Structure formats: structure tokens, C-alpha cells
Image: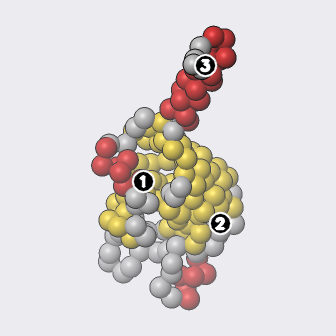
Amino acid sequence: MNPRFGGPGAALTCFVLLAAITVSAQTGDKYTARLGMVPAANAAQQASVTGRGTATAALAGNKLTINGTFDGLPAAAIAARLHLGIAKGARGKAIADLTITKGTSGTLSGSVDLTAAQIEALRQGRLYLQVHSERGIPPEQGKVQPEVDNSNLWGWLLR
């Protein structure tokens, strides 16, 4: 007896597999971040760095969509940015501004079109979020560092 794959059962199996592949392609990679306090150098800075939050991100094609919440900031949030670290766990430059609630708690969100190199950095764990408030880590005397100034929270986007 020669078993054959055919008939209505085969058609249903093919349809289910095709649907699963299509859904998988549309949902893309998922990432999460726990937003915690930026490391502070001294006690005076530690008093300015409070708060917490979470964020999720989904990559569909080259578009990264980010949504998150935060609370407990010492002053109103003024900016949220997506950064590209020079290595996993190491700070780097901002690559995109995100929308953020201007309060001590609220939401952040945004969509960013990533380059191929930025997508690879995301997959390597080198992209992170940073939240700045009116009273985060102050700039050092005579030194402007936009990637650090007035920052309160940060979190790495990881799978």
C-alpha cells in the first residue's frame, strides 16, 4: 500500500502552515526593556535619579515601534531617546527622539526606521532607551553631554 499525501486534509495543512508563516512575518521580533536608574557618580546625583518603568518594542521589517510607561521621576520628563551603544551595556549617541508625557509619570512611544547596521545592533543588545527629566544627573561643570545630561532612567532593549 502506498500512502499518499492529498485530498482535503493536505489542503487544510498547507493553509494552516501558510497562515502561520504569514503571521510570523508580520509580527516580527519582540524586545523588552526595564527602565531603571542611570548610574550616578555621587550622593548628590543619586538624589536626582529616581524612577522606574518598562517598555516593549517590535521590529517589523526595518520599523521599530516602541511603547512604554514610567513613574517616580523627581521632576517632569523632558525627553525620551533611543540610543545606539558602542557595545552591549555601554552608552552611545542618541539616534531618535521619542514622544513622552511631560510629567513625573506617563508614557513614551515612537516608531523609528532603522538601518541594517542599527537592526544588527538591536539584535546584539546595543540599543537602549533613555528618559531625561528637569532634574536628572546635572551636566559636569563646563561640560555638555547630551547623552547623559538630566538623565534619570535607561533600559536596554533585549529579547
Instruction: Choose mark 2 or mark 1, whichever is in front.
Output: 1
Q: Quadrant of residue 105?
A: bottom right
Image marks 3 and 1: residues in contact by CB distance under 8 Å: no
Q: CA distance from mark 2 to mark 1?
A: 24 Å
Which residue is disc 1 drawn over? 123
SS at mark 3 in the image: loop
Q: CA distance from mark 3 to mark 1?
A: 50 Å
In the rendered image, the vertical position of residue 123 relative to residue 6, given as above or below: below
SS at mark 1 in the image: helix
Q: What amino acid type is highlighted by mark number 3?
A: Met
Work out which quarter of the rendered image holds the N terminus and state it: top right
Q: Residue furthest front?
A: 1
Q: CA distance from mark 3 to mark 2?
A: 66 Å
Q: Position of residue 28 (x, y in %)?
A: 51, 39
Lower sequence index among marks 3 and 1: 3
SS at mark 2 in the image: strand
Q: Position of residue 46 (x, y in %)?
A: 57, 82
Image marks 2 and 1: residues in contact by CB distance under 8 Å: no
Q: Position of residue 73 (x, y in %)?
A: 64, 66
Q: What amino acid type is highlighted by mark number 1?
A: Arg
Lower sequence index among marks 3 and 2: 3
Which residue is disc 3 drawn over? 1
In the rendered image, the vertical position of residue 107 relative to residue 130, given as above or below: above
Write the residue at 58% across / 26% down: 17
Which residue is disc 2 drawn over? 52
